[in-house]
Amino acid sequence: AIKRSGRDLTIVAYSNMVLTAQAAAEKLEKEGISVEIVDPRTLNPLDIHTIVASVKKTHRVIVVEEDWKTGGVGAEISSQIYEHAFTALDAPIMRVAGKDTPMPYAKNLEHAAIPQVEDIIQAAINLL
């Protein structure tokens, strides 16, 4: 589902990362960057049609997830975007994901292990 409409880039996020992506989009909007946020709602089946339609509109995409970058769901989403919308992309897909480390129990260490608003903003700036 489209959670926020935009024109400059698409962020695909699920679960808690939708809220983090929305916070990043609000800050990016203040800098004149319009972000579309897609929440696929379910991972299987994946709503690839909504994702592809958004990518064809914005031509740039960031996939955001708490999961590890290596072998995570974001890798599958990215793969499907490449399969269905490669020619629509103006830049490589960016991925913002959890660190490839065991998830810590301490809140301050958890903050360091999962993506934060600033990580998404930096990825967007690099992508544009």
Image (cartoon, grey):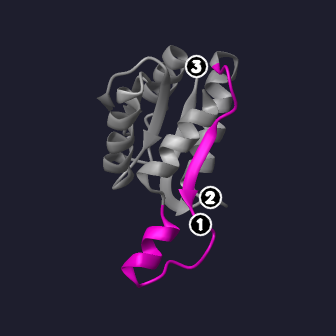
Marks 2 and 1 in Cβ contact (< 8 Å): yes
Q: Are marks 3 and 2 in contact (CB under 8 Å)?
A: no
Task: Report the front residue among 32 and 53.
Answer: 32
Q: What residue is at 35 percent from the left and 46 percent from the top? A: 18
Q: Position of residue 37 (x, y in %)?
A: 38, 33
Tag 2 residue: 69
User: For the point 55% across and 56% down, which residue is it?
Assistant: 97
Viewer-side residue, 21 vs 112:
112
What is the crowding at mark 1: few (fewer than 14 residues within 10 Å), some, or many (at least 20)? some
Estimate the x, y position of residue 5 in percent, counting from the top left.
33, 22
Q: CA distance from mark 1 to mark 3?
A: 27 Å
What amino acid is at disc 1? Lys
Residue depth check, mark 2 versus mark 1: number of the one nearer the observer? 1
Left or right position of 79 against 46: right
Residue 80 lies left or right of residue 41; in this view the side is right
Q: Residue 123: image x %, image y %?
A: 57, 41
Q: Is residue 41 visible?
A: no
Q: Earlier in the sequence, mark 2 or mark 1?
A: 2
Q: Which residues are magenta?
A: 89-114
Dot 1 lies on which element? loop
Quote the CA–CA distance across marks 3 and 2.
22 Å
Q: 108 or 2: which is nearer to us?
A: 108
Please check the rendered image and state whether residue 2 is part of the magenta-colored stretch, yes or no: no
Q: Amino acid at mark 2?
A: Lys
Which quarter of the rendering shows the C terminus? top right
Amino acid type, label 3: His
Regarding mark 3 in the picture, which secondary structure is present there? Answer: loop
Q: Which residue is at a point 48% across and 82% down the rendered structure image? A: 104
> Which tag, 3 or 2, sits closer to the chain's start?
3
Res. 14 in view: yes
From the image, tell me which residue sits under label 3: 59
| Residue 99 badge | 1
